[in-house]
Image: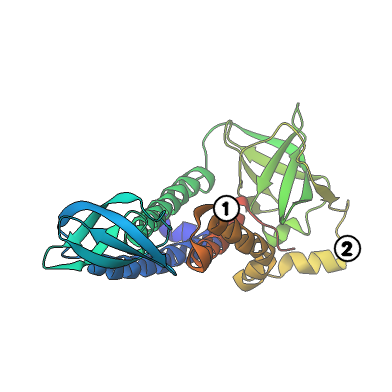
Amino acid sequence: MVKTLLTLRPVRHILLTSALALLACAVVFAVQLAEYSAAAGELRGMTARSTATVVRLDGGAAVIHIASADATATVEMDVRPAPGSTLPVFYDPADPSRAAIRGATALVTTDRTTTYATATVVAAVGVLVVDVLVLLTRFVRPGGTRRTVPIRRVKVQRGLLTRSWLELETPQTAWLPVYFSPALIGLPSPAVAELTGDRRVLVRAGGTIFYPAGRLHRVEPRGRRLDNPAEPDAERAEAARRPVTLRRQLRTDLPVLAVAPVVGVFWALVDGTGVAGWLAVTILAAAFGFWWAALRGSDPS
């Protein structure tokens, strides 16, 4: 079964983009782990607790006085405290000049990197779970009744994504999104197809199986619609026999990358993580954009 699935073009497309998403998660995780280790090293040995008074601000640092140790420390800050405020402090009893208060860069970095690393692990697990569910629910042939109905291939562009749909002339007209196959290009309109399954439908037409890229819809999909001609011309017939490479498929999905930097900017502004946060989120959004397009069944024709 696994060997059979791997021969299917949409499955290979999904697995390739899943690998890109997992690689992005691994890269972001590794970077966050390195930053966490560096910040945790700065905090190592700060076992004593007390309170400290902010004496003054010095650029991006705060000069504090630790009363219990009668010592002064300079702390690099991400959040600027008010001069004269009293805050809890962690410091090294052997060297009170090594200290950290709330908003210190080292503390903020450990919190941020822990959150990002956890999020990437959750995202990676989510990719694997969704992939398994998709493979089991969309590419394993369903049981149930078989019937013959007329179908039409409809290409719909909505936003950055173009998908192929099959319009099924059942008693109540239905629309089924399908993963791209070159055979869709040369499909007459209408064409006779065999439908297998009840709740989950598999379509076979002209010797080709068209696998569902989502659930059956009873409402016509929104977007810019393009119908196949009644009979394919010579150019379409030739295109239907020509395989579409995964490289071409990825080039088709490039527009989804336009969203990634915008998502990164939004996250960096909300989270206050600056360039590092923007870069991490942009990488993840770009990789997951490719994966999302593959799951949805983008049409490269």
**Residue at the top extreme of this rendering:** 171
- The structure residue drawn at horizontal position 38% and vertical position 54%, both measured from the top left corner, is 115
**Mark 2 neighbour density, 10 Å: few (under 14) some (14–19) many (20 or more):** few
Tell me if residue 48 can be seen.
Answer: yes
C-beta proximity under 8 Å, tags 2 and 1: no
When asked about the image quadrant of residue 176, the answer is top right
- The picture places residue 98, in percent across and down from the top left corner, at 22, 67
In this rendering, would 71 be left or right of 110?
A: left
When asked about the image quadrant of residue 55, the answer is bottom left
Pointer 2 residue: 233
- The picture places residue 164, in percent across and down from the top left corner, at 72, 51
- The picture places residue 246, in percent across and down from the top left corner, at 60, 69
Which residue is at the front of the view, 300 or 57?
57
Which residue is at the front of the view, 193 or 62?
62
**Residue at the left extreme of this rendering:** 94
Three-letter residue code for mark 1: Leu
**Mark 1 neighbour density, 10 Å: few (under 14) some (14–19) many (20 or more):** many
- The structure residue drawn at horizontal position 84% and vertical position 51%, both measured from the top left corner, is 226
Tell me if residue 283 can be seen.
Answer: no
- Labelled disc at residue 295: 1
Asked if 55 appears above or below 195 in the picture, the reply is below
Q: Quadrant of the N terminus?
A: bottom left
Under circle 1, the secondary element is helix
Q: Marks 2 and 1, Cα distance to the nearest angstrom?
A: 30 Å
Number of labelled discs? Answer: 2
Q: In terms of sequence position, does the residue under pointer 2 or pointer 1 come before the other?
A: 2
- The structure residue drawn at horizontal position 54% and vertical position 52%, both measured from the top left corner, is 270
